[in-house]
Amino acid sequence: MLNSARSAVLNPYHEPFCISPENKQITIPIQINQTNPKLIDLLRIDLEGSHNETIRIGASELKRLRKTAMNEQRPKDGIGPLILGYPSKKTGRYTLEKVVDESGLEVRPRFSELLVVPCPFAHVKSSSGQKCRGDLSDVSFEITGTPPLTLTYNKTIEGSLIEHKSLQSIQPDGFSSPLLKQESTFDSLVQSGKVDISWARPCKVSIPVNEIMSRPGEWIYSVDSVKDALGNTVSHEKQFDEDGKAKSRHQDLQQSVFVQDKPRVSFGCDTQRPLKVAKGQTIALPLRFGTVGKGHPRDDTYSLGYLFTPEESLLENGEHNPEAQRHIEVNLKSPRQRVEVTRSGLYTLKSIRAGWCDGEVDEPASCILEHPPEPEVSITAESITDKCDRMPIGLRADLDFVGTPPFTLDYVIETKGKPSEFKQAKSENRRYQLELKPKTAGRYTYRFTSLTDQYYQARRISEILEVDVKPSANAELMLDGTAKQPRLCLGDQAEFSVRFTGEPPWSLEYEVVYGGKKTKSKIEDVSETEYAFRTTKLQSGGDYSLVLVSVSDSRGCPESLKEEVKFHVQHQRPKAGFGTIEGKRTAQAVEDAALALPIRLTGEKPWHVKVKNIDDQYSPPKEYRFENPNTEIKVNRQGTYEIDGVRDVICDGQVEEGANKFVVSWRDRPQLRVSESPTLKMVDDSHYRKEDVCEGDEDYLDIAFSGKFALPCLHR
């Protein structure tokens, strides 16, 4: 007999249930209303439909389930609907077959069913963890569960979340499910009389994700969550650490793909701007590395491939000769490693690879290496003669070079009685004229020993020139390194030395140029080879030049000269004088106290100033060095201080009249004097005795002070 007032229903809220390796057991909800069952039979059909079983829940088990439910749910009236939770570890279709309450009456169960399926899961994989910029990602997600499925995944690049994406309606081809029918609900599925749950079986579906990997760095694809057709959702948030990395037990939830930028390479030379190197020498190919993404070249290993055809085997059009060309592969540890070559010919870049990525070869991709011609020189010479008596005074050598400028020609000058002198002639052009004019008479041999150009160093040559000379008159200034532009004091004479060549006696004509005016002077009958002379006193400050105009020797043939030296005369001599203190050059101070006396200077620093105390005959003058024109000296003795002399960096100076002395005196010491009277007598230098007075009478003591009056400081 059935009791229609009482009821039982399976999974009243239509919740989804699934079993996974992490959650191996579910709790099947059975709602009972106004009944206390002592027996419940559940029918389970596995998802394959090949096996079914009846699960009987007896009185003792139901009593325990009811007690637990009462403790957790506590219906207000004690008899309201109660949901019993029956544990199960098996998947399949569950239905209520039979319910008997404690009175022995069978309770009519409402038709309901519960599908328990394996929980959906997914993992991600890639064909390769190493990709190049511009490649397809070739990543796929393998999803297993009851279709249609929904996958949510994350994509990060170099630690930044780029995309959070959801893929829906994932199902195998040709798959059909009652859940896909329009207006289909779980209730309608439950009420269908036909038991066919093959659509609920888990399926494995692979979803490819192919996108262009446009940025270098680490790309990470990770599974966020999976949801099946019944609503079972598995979130994997807890399977990742704070850095977004999958924990060790869940590595299949994440796939890293390392994307590398493709390298680029080109030459820093081309067929119009060839490389040049001396024969037998090596040179580095000027390789320019970069990346397709316009970034800096990777500090990685490189594999470089290029073609080489020797210069003598090139085709007439300058291209590679297939019969003579060689393909060369070079492995570089970094883009900074040099690729050294020595043979002339055509080099053409063909391939570049960095890390695991093949790159691109940019233009210019071809470069020619040439061996410049070895340097040579041909020398022709003619005599240089004196314009007066046509005697030889030297050689004029014309140098004709072959090679690449600049040229350096080494030669040795030899003459009897003197050590050999080594010289160099340098030329930026292929033709050069060298004048060889000895300064003293004799027979001279010029041995040309080696020639250097831009590419070849010290190529040996053997050329010899000889000449007997009797030099014409000449004079040159003798200036050391510090006197080429001397600085003089106002009123000084400029002194210079000259060295003569030729036959004595000599005559020298020179000019002193100042302010656009020239003053000519002449020195005659000089017999010394080296001779010093002075100009007149220079009474104006400014820039001067001394120019050697001409010289003649015993033959009386004047030779023009071009030498010139510049010098500067200061406009004023330095000056020194004492400044004032409160408008005076006198000051008083406490005995033995330090006093600063101001000094004022003109000229150029540093100054050296001598000061003496003329009242102290035992104290010598003291010299001070100053860097500042407004300065001071410290004194601690009284007397009259006098500036005895001054000199700046160049010149001796003068002391200003009226400002050359400063008087320092001590203040009088304070004194106390007691006035004697008939009632007060001095006993000794520091003691006085006063006659006795009667108590209550007034008396007094006269005290006189000398010194500077000052109010006492009062302190609280």
Image: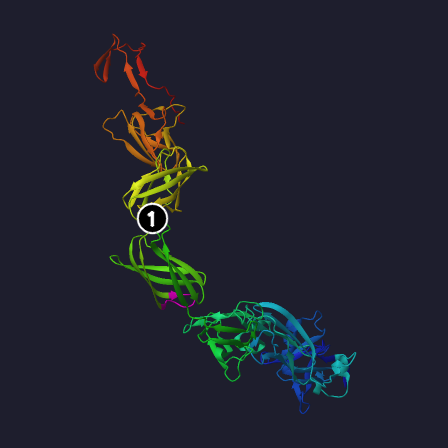
Image side of residue 407 versus residue 185, left or right: left
Image side of residue 390 versus residue 306, left or right: left
Residue in the foreground of this view, choosing between 656 and 71: 656
Corner quadrant of residue 517? top left
Q: What stretch is highlighted in magenta?
A: 451-460
Residue in the foreground of this view, choosing between 14 and 280: 280
Residue in the foreground of this view, choosing between 582 and 341: 341
The residue that mark 1 highlights is 473
Residue 653: image x %, image y %? Answer: 35, 32
Q: Does the magenta stretch include residue 247?
A: no
Image side of residue 494 versus residue 161, left or right: left
**Residue 231 visible within the image:** yes
> Which quarter of the image is occupied by the C terminus?
top left
Report the residue that reaches farthest toward the bottom: 50
Magenta segment, principal secondary structure? loop
Corner quadrant of residue 462? bottom left
**Helix, strand, or loop for circle 1?**
loop
Q: Does the magenta stretch include residue 457?
A: yes
